Amino acid sequence: MATLDVYNVNREKVSQVEVVDSVFAAEVKEHLFYDVVRMQLNRRRAGTSSVKTRSEVSGGGKKPWKQKGTGRARSGSSRSPVWRGGGIAFGPKPRSYDIKVPKKVRRAAMCSALTLKVQQEKLLVLDALEVSEIKTAAFVAILEKLKAGNALIIADADHNLLLSSRNVPHVKVLPPEGLNLHDVLKYDELFITQTSLRSIERSLAA
């Protein structure tokens, strides 16, 4: 099994932890990232855009003028898409943008992303991460000690920590069950607490 260094909030090495090779030392398959991130972003789309077709706009029940003899182009309804105030042709209607990606592919993509962070030395395991009070300044002080820039932090769902981090730009805090490929790839650094590390291993280990 591979080992990772464990640090405290002062970024001082305190111990080492063994990790599952299939999660943190897997084969990196970057070609899987596109489909999984696309699936994730598509699921965020509401798909509620809608316009009225010629059958849904009001009016237009009567033929505007007779077919022949007026010198104007023939017309059968004022609801035609070529008329001002008429229906829209080929406009958007409510739909689902969801696409299917196999569970094994999603798992392999996540393991590849975590392994890539380890290889790039962008993954840091923390022994613990706690904020004693709901205060942004206290959380920022911890980030400064960790020398964290554009970072994703995976820690147990601590109420104080989650609320203290909400207003800090370029940093996102998630519980281990909220770990997702888009955020792992989006943020430069990844910080994971030891307890969250075990939760991630249990969910991803083959």
Image: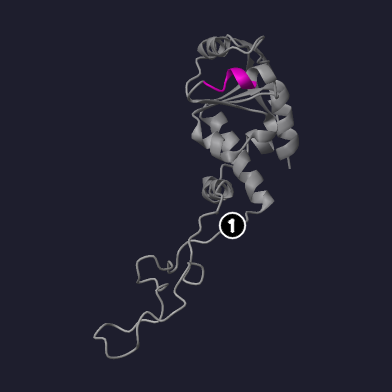
Q: Which residues are magenta?
A: 162-167
| Horizontal side of residue 55 vs 108, given as left or right | left
* Image point (40%, 68%), residue name: 86
Residue 138 is covered by the magenta coloring: no
* Image point (57%, 29%), residue name: 118
Depth check: 192 or 24 in front?
192
Depth check: 80 or 137 in front?
80
Q: Quadrant of residue 77?
A: bottom left
> Vertical placement of 63 versus 19: above or below?
below
> Vertical placement of 49 versus 16: above or below?
below
| Horizontal side of residue 139 vs 64, given as left or right | right
Residue 31 x/y as whole percent: 52, 49
Residue 22 x/y as whole percent: 68, 38
Give the residue pinned by disc 1. Answer: 96
Residue 15 x/y as whole percent: 67, 14
Residue 164 is covered by the magenta coloring: yes
> Vertical placement of 57 versus 24: above or below?
below
Instruction: Residue type at mark 1: give it.
Output: Ser
* Residue 126 in sight: no
Q: Residue furthest left?
A: 71
* Image point (63%, 47%), residue name: 106
| Horizontal side of residue 96 vs 128, given as left or right | left
Under circle 1, the secondary element is loop
Depth check: 115 or 93 in front?
93
Q: Quadrant of the N terminus?
A: top right
Q: Quadrant of the C terminus?
A: top right
> Vertical placement of 94 versus 86: above or below?
above
